[in-house]
């Protein structure tokens, strides 16, 4: 399978500690929820081979799950190099994690510039109309500021729209990559 891979896309998932970055990736890669996932120390690395309907070849996706704690900022810089896509993740139950997305944008773009990205609000399974603390206008504003192509609410616990995040971002990266080859 590796020999038939034509495209290689490095994707970093970033956001504050405990927003669910690792559990989102576990749900996407292994189709399971890991309830006792430990905080990421530095980074985690994963690979998945996928086929996009629009592409006649296999695509290798390399995921970098970067630690969200401020003390790891100096470590993260090296991992951004070569990234073709970013997932900006925040926790729908913690407004401060949305507020910090612009800081993440500055950190990412200071190293790799603007690349295709999505904004992801995780833990939608914990949200009801009565307890929603982040309104969609705030999210729309942040989405525009990070130039995200889309905003998706996910649940890493039950798998809600997790697949959508990566299929849409992969297609977006493919389109930009193809355009850059012209």
Image (cartoon, rainbow, N blue to C red):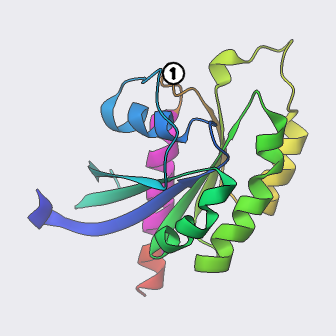
Tell me the SS state at disc 1: loop
Q: Does any portion of residue 56 appear in the rendered image?
A: no
Using the image as rendered, state which of residue 169 and residue 41 is in the foreground. 41
Q: Position of residue 70 (x, y in %)?
A: 68, 56
Location of residue 134 with respect to 7 vertically, above or below = above
Q: Position of residue 50 (x, y in %)?
A: 28, 50
Q: Position of residue 119 (x, y in %)?
A: 67, 49
- Name the image quarter holding residue 138: top right
Residue extent of the magenta highlight: 162-176
Tell me the quarter of the image containing the C terminus. Answer: bottom left
**Would you say 94 lies left or right of 12 here?**
right
Using the image as rendered, state which of residue 145 and residue 176 is in the foreground. 145
Query: At x 46% / y 47%, what residue is drawn?
Result: 166
Location of mark 1 (residue): 157
Main secondary-structure element of the magenta-colored stretch: helix
Location of residue 72 with respect to 164 vertically, above or below = below
Classed neighbour count for the residue bearing mark 1: other residues with Cα under 10 Å, few (<14), some (14–19), many (≥20): many
Q: Is residue 53 magenta?
A: no
Q: Position of residue 145 (x, y in %)?
A: 81, 61
Query: At x 52% / y 43%, what residue is drawn?
Result: 165
Query: At x 52% / y 39%, what residue is drawn?
Result: 39
Query: At x 38% / y 65%, what residue is drawn?
Result: 9
Q: Does any portion of residue 168 appear in the rendered image?
A: yes
Q: How many marks?
A: 1
**Would you say 135 lies left or right of 126 here?**
right
């Amino acid at each position: 399978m590796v020999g038939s891979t034509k495209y290689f896309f490095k994707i970093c998932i970033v956001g504050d500690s405990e927003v669910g970055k690792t559990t989102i990736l576990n749900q996407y890669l292994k189709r399971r929820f890991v309830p006792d996932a430990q905080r990421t120390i530095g980074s985690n690395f994963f690979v998945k081979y996928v086929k996009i309907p629009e592409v006649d070849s296999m695509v290798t996706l390399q995921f970098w799950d970067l630690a969200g704690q401020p003390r790891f900022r100096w470590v993260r810089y090296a991992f951004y190099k070569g990234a073709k896509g970013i997932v900006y993740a925040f926790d729908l139950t913690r407004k401060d994690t949305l507020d910090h997305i612009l800081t993440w944008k500055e950190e990412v773009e200071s190293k790799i510039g603007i690349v295709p990205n999505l904004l992801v609000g995780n833990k939608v399974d914990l949200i009801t109309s009565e307890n929603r603390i982040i309104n969609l206008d705030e999210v729309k504003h942040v989405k525009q500021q990070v130039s995200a192509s889309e905003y998706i609410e996910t649940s890493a616990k039950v798998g809600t729209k997790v697949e959508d995040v990566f299929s849409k971002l992969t297609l977006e990266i493919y389109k930009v990559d193809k355009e850059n080859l012209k």
